[in-house]
């Protein structure tokens, strides 16, 4: 395993354990809201601080983009992290949340790790291969839409009417949909072959950068904006197994191929 992949796997485990410890500590969560429905807890801030400190100690000239602290540093190597993805679930004691850490070098995403601590699932990928703990990684081979699951993400950044319209297209295609409230959970489902598609119209890079590396390594396909655009604004993200083009077109509202 290359040293950066080994580093992010170990860091994701440490970050997840810190988040679990803080949530279990009486008064450890002090919850705030960045916007209506967009929560941040003391654990989000502490875990991102840990991630930034560990990266700075090992690669002091690299830049870091985090959900809570934004972009700090100016370098060809940028670490991209959501310390606790699915904060609204995490702060209520639900299991659907995760740690996401990725690395971009010279304008390309090269490494990523997603860790779902309460589920005991970790997947990571880099130039030397794929690592999976808690389950085998590999996208689904299902090609029948009536057996397919589509995970959706939603945020108030998208026009509310667009979401039920997307659900209607999925049901009309014969498939079923799920919405966990954490991109990492839906993207992990695609990586593990437990769902066929993940889509979100307006998703920040820190929620999905790791998955944009891992899904292809698990045999799937991803579509998103150029990295330079996604670094500065949320963009549409699609990850899928590659065996259901008609369903993917329905999810995205595109003409059938
Ligand atoms: C969340 C994402 C989710 C999205 C939410 C939110 P957070 O991340 O995982 O997919 O729909 O709007 O962005 O804010 O809990 O880290």
Image (cartoon, helix red, strand yellow):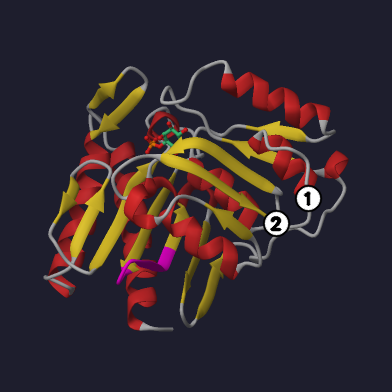
Residue bearing the label numbered 1: 244
Position of 98 relative to 221 (above/below): above
In depth, the one of 250 and 207 nearer the eye is 250
Counting from the top left corner in percent of width and height, residue 87 is at 38, 34
Question: Which percent across, then down, holds residue 89?
Answer: 45, 31
Residue appearing at x 34%, y 26% in the figure: 38
- The quadrant where ligand 1 appears is top left
| Any part of residue 128 in sight | yes
Dividing the image into 4 quarters, which one contains the N terminus? bottom left
4 displayed left or right of 64: right
Q: Find out whether residue 28 is within the magenta segment.
A: no
Which image quadrant for residue 153?
A: top right
Return the mark for residue 102: none
State the image coordinates of residue 98 (x, y, percent, origin top left). 44, 47
Magenta segment boundaries in residue numbering = 105-112
Q: Is residue 83 above or below residue 87?
A: below
Q: Is residue 234 left or right of residue 164?
A: left
Q: At 46% from the left edge and 51% from the top edge, which residue is drawn?
A: 117
Q: Secondary structure of the magenta portion, mostly? A: strand
Circle 2: element type? loop
Q: Considering only vertical position in the picture, is 51 above or below 217?
A: above
Is residue 17 shown to the viewer in this render?
no
Cβ atoms under marks 2 and 1 closer than 8 Å: yes
Residue beneath disc 2: 241
């Amino acid at each position: 395993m290359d040293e950066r992949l080994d580093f992010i796997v170990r860091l994701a485990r440490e970050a997840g354990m810190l988040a679990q410890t803080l949530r279990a500590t009486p008064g450890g969560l002090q919850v705030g809201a960045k916007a209506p429905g967009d929560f941040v807890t003391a654990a989000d801030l502490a875990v991102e601080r840990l991630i930034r400190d560990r990266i700075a100690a090992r690669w002091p000239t690299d830049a870091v983009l985090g959900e809570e602290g934004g972009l700090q540093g100016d370098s060809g190597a940028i670490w991209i992290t959501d310390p606790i993805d699915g904060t609204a679930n995490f702060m209520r004691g639900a299991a659907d949340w995760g740690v996401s850490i990725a690395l971009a070098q010279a304008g390309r995403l090269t490494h990523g790790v997603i860790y779902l601590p309460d589920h005991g699932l970790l997947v990571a990928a880099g130039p030397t291969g794929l690592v999976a703990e808690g389950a085998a990684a590999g996208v689904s081979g299902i090609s029948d839409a009536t057996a397919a699951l589509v995970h959706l993400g939603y945020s108030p950044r998208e026009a509310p009417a667009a979401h039920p319209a997307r659900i209607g297209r999925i049901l009309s295609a014969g498939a079923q949909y799920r919405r966990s409230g954490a991109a990492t959970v839906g993207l992990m489902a695609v990586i593990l072959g437990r769902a066929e598609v993940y889509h979100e119209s307006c998703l920040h890079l820190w929620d999905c950068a790791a998955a944009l590396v891992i899904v292809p390594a698990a045999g799937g396909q991803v579509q998103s904006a150029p990295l330079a655009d996604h670094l500065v604004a949320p963009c549409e993200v699609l990850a899928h197994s590659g065996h259901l083009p008609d369903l993917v077109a329905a999810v995205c509202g595109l003409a059938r191929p």
